[in-house]
Image (cartoon, grey):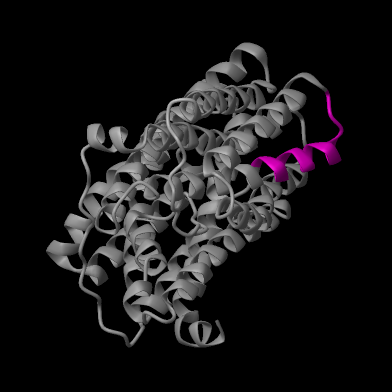
Amino acid sequence: MLKVLAHSWPLLLGVMLMMVGNGVQGSLLGIRGTLEAFSTFHLSIVMSAYFLGFLIGSRLAPIMIRNVGHVRVFAALGSLISAVLVLYPMLVEWQVWAVMRVIIGFGFAGIYITAESWLNNTATNETRGQALSAYMIVQMLGIVASQVLMAFGDPFGYDLFLIPSVLVSLAFLPILLADSPAPTFDSAERLGFRELFRISPVGCVGMLISGGVFSAMFGMASVWGTLSLLSFKQIALFTSALYVGGLILQYPVGWLSDRVDRRRIMLWLAVLATVVMALAAFVNLPYPALLVVAALLGGITYPMYSLIIAYTNDYLPKEQMAAASAGLIFLNGFGAIFGPLVTGWLMGVVGPHGFFLFIGLLYAAQAAYIGWRMTRRAAPQGTGGFAGLSPNASSLAVGAVLDQEKR
């Protein structure tokens, strides 16, 4: 690991700075928009717009990279993101914010693909697994750091909009000034969705639900906190707990899933999430208990994403794993578009607790479907290794992890 850090620290530092910038604006908009009297439904559109842009970017960015190269795409998208970030407080209209969120999502999709291809290119077969693990870790550390930064800012001021723009701009320097040559780019092939569903119904349905959970959780947490009259620091700490829980529980859940039928692990996790969300939705919990709820929710949602990919790959030959994962990631992104929209509508109908209610309903549906599928199909005889993955990762990073796992 030390060898990886010594060789790749400029790139990893750049990724962490980008995640700090992205994490601040993602949470800040929910708080500022609520304070500006945007309705929860309008805010849900703003939050969903990011995932729409990300989905579009994940499809178009590879084409752009092949046409003009990594450096130009990286610099162009980085400049676009930095410019949009400083425009938010100047154009306080939910319709304008929604358009800018599409642009931000599109830009970050291209940035992630570019950074991941660079990291994959500089690593060797012996260090690729460690390098990608370090990449996932710095992503989560960057998000946690963004919430710490938010806790000391003013949502009505300009500083919290300017700082992310500066951090994103600084994040480009390590990559653009790196002395390693720009890598070649090969985008993953994709399986048809009908074929993918035939191979793994649990994987396809699970990824749609996972996308909805992830986007609702991280897109609307700050809106829920503001409507619940939490302080700025309390909202930041709650959001941090989501990521810390995911960071802590990723490995133990993965270790267990390599020894037990993965569907049983997913079923247990989905049932646990349903119970915890029902408790949070129908009981007025004290704030310390809400932090435990957040840590459990993040600790379930992050491993669930990785479990779904690992379970689907258990039914695939090695040659199809990357293609299947690209299809699953698209389904995840498609589901993510609707998570904030439905959450915002439900919160408008039943109040702030609709945030937990919607996530609980999604996990209840997932538990029911997995339980039914377990009666229709036996577990695979042999399973591959579990790899901790972030829902923010592109198909390139996932493909590289799978390539490392099958060696």
Which residue is at the front of the view, 80 or 403?
Answer: 403
Which residue is at the front of the view, 326 or 108?
Answer: 326
Residue 251 is situated, as x and y percent measured from the top left of the image, at 62, 59
| Residue at the spot 60% in from the left edge and 16% down from the top edge | 348
Which residue is at the front of the view, 10 or 79?
Answer: 10
Q: Say which quarter of the image contains residue 407.
A: bottom left
Does the image show residue 96? no
Which residue is at the front of the view, 323 or 261?
Answer: 261
Look at the image and say whether residue 285 sits in the magenta stretch.
yes
Residue 237 is situated, as x and y percent measured from the top left of the image, at 74, 48
Q: Main secondary structure of the magenta part?
A: helix
Question: Which residue in the rendered view is the most extreme toward the top?
Answer: 349
Task: Tell me: residue 70, above or below residue 267.
Answer: below
| Residue at the spot 45% in from the left edge and 34% down from the top edge | 206
Look at the image and say whether residue 217 sits in the magenta stretch.
no
Task: Tell me: residue 99, above or below residue 389.
Answer: above
Residue 161 is situated, as x and y percent measured from the top left of the image, at 54, 52
Q: Which residues are magenta?
A: 284-297
Count of numbered marks: 0
Side (left or right) of 250 relative to 275: left
Task: Tell me: residue 332, above or below residue 43.
Answer: below
Task: Tell me: residue 20, above or below residue 352.
Answer: below
Classify the position of the N terminus by image quarter.
bottom right
Residue 104 is situated, as x and y percent measured from the top left of the image, at 39, 48
Does the image show residue 278? yes
| Residue at the spot 54% in from the left edge and 44% down from the top edge | 261
| Residue at the spot 24% in from the left edge and 31% down from the top edge | 194
